[in-house]
């Protein structure tokens, strides 16, 4: 495997080609329902899922997503295209959801985002996976990772374990969920993600790393034994 | 929270352990390693039988996350939003 092949930095994002996107923007500016419907089909359920990071329940998330669409329709004339359309829409959603989450938190002890504090310490790889310090081969794997067969293609993995992966992401504490949704599920850049969430680049990487490590840990039975155990994953 | 290599162990020059490798995987994929650490990471990738598997698994998981499909928009929600849209575009 060459180093270049292992780079994800250039992986395609979910955004369509620029000409399709500018067509949607133009259509929306002309008030075309078909352009609006295309955007709804593309992003609405993603917006609702992302809103749940900050707000209390599904109906609040649905309302925040609807407010976001109103802001999109009203703001599209002023949209300058400095970021991709998807990133702009997610940014509006995040602002509205955060504000609502803050309001909600006045009437209950914790906001959805910060109540994660007590379980914020997402545990990484268990130390007993590695040979303890002082021994020969200290810091190396205690037992080998499975062989080549335990490297499924991304398409196969998405096909066979996609539902499980999405549920696992939903289980992550808010900050981990928000970064993973924006970066890995929706393909936003690190810069876009930092801007939307108001976090530093270094912090973003730490959060992303912990979220990905956690996801891999939950997928270990699948990686070891393949699709036949995917039902047991739940 | 500035580095993913935070297990508190001294790092021997040019000789990464698997445990350290695992901590650096995201920084590597994000192209956020300094030149020297990147070289040590890549040396480990050549020397270690297991960590290349770990890296490929991680890439597959990240790639799979990018292929996930959200559930379809329900027709009911779509109809509600489309009717709102007709009001909004007329300045309502
Ligand atoms: Zn190794």
Image: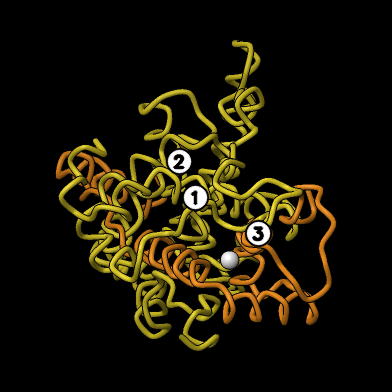
Chain colours: A yellow, B orange
Secondary structure of the residue carrying tag 2 is helix
Name the residue that disc number 3 marks. Answer: A137
Q: Residue at x 26, y 68 (%)?
A: A155
Residue A224 on image: x %, y %: 31, 54
Reading the chain from its start, which is encountered first: label 1 or label 3?
1
Q: Is residue B82 left or right of residue A50?
A: left
Which label was assigned to residue A71?
A: 1
Kindly check if marks 1 and 2 are in contact, taking CB atoms under 8 A apart as contact: yes
Secondary structure of the residue carrying tag 3 is loop
Kindly check if marks 2 and 3 are in contact, taking CB atoms under 8 A apart as contact: no
Q: For the C terminus of chain A, give its image quadrant.
A: top left
Q: Quadrant of residue A94?
A: top right
* Callout 1 and callout 2 share a chain: yes
Mark 1, chain letter?
Answer: A
Tell whether circle 2 marks a residue whose Cβ is less than 8 angstroms from ligand 1.
no
* Residue nearest the viewer, comparing B71 with A211: A211
Sort mark 2 into few (<14), some (14-19) or many (20+) by Cα contacts within 10 Å. Answer: some
Which label was assigned to residue A67?
A: 2
Q: Residue at x 38, y 82 (%)?
A: A17
Reading the chain from its start, which is encountered first: label 2 or label 3?
2
Residue A20 on image: x %, y %: 34, 80
**Quarter of the displayed picture in which ligand 1 can be seen:** bottom right
């Amino acid at each position: 495997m060459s180093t270049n092949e292992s780079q994800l930095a250039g992986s395609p994002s979910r955004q369509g080609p620029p000409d399709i996107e500018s067509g949607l923007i133009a259509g929306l500016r002309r008030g075309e329902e078909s352009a609006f419907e295309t955007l709804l089909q593309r992003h609405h359920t993603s917006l609702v899922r992302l809103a749940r990071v900050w707000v209390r329940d599904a109906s609040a998330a649905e309302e925040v997503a609807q407010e976001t669409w109103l802001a999109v329709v009203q703001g599209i004339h002023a949209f300058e295209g400095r970021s991709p359309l998807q990133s702009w829409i997610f940014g509006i959603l995040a602002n509205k959801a955060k504000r609502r989450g803050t309001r909600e938190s006045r009437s209950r002890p914790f906001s959805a985002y910060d109540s994660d504090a007590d379980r914020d310490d997402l545990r990484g790889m268990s130390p007993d996976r590695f040979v303890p310090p002082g021994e020969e081969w200290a810091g190396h794997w205690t037992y080998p990772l499975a062989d080549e067969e335990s490297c499924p293609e991304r398409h196969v993995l998405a096909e066979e374990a996609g539902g499980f992966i999405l549920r696992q992401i939903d289980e992550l504490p808010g900050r981990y969920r928000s970064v993973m949704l924006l970066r890995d599920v929706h393909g936003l850049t690190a810069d876009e993600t930092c801007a939307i969430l108001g976090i530093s680049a270094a912090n973003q990487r730490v959060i992303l790393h912990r979220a990905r490590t956690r996801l891999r840990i939950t997928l270990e039975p699948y990686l070891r034994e393949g699709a036949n155990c995917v039902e047991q994953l739940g | 929270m500035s580095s993913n290599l935070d297990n508190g162990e001294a790092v021997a020059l040019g000789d990464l352990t698997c445990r350290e490798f695992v901590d650096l995987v995201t920084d590597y994929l994000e192209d956020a390693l300094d030149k020297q650490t990147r070289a040590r990471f890549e040396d480990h990738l050549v020397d270690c039988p297991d960590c290349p598997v770990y890296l490929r698994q991680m890439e597959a998981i990240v790639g799979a996350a990018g292929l996930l499909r959200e559930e379809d928009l329900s027709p009911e929600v779509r109809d509600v939003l489309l009717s709102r849209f007709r009001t909004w575009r007329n300045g309502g």
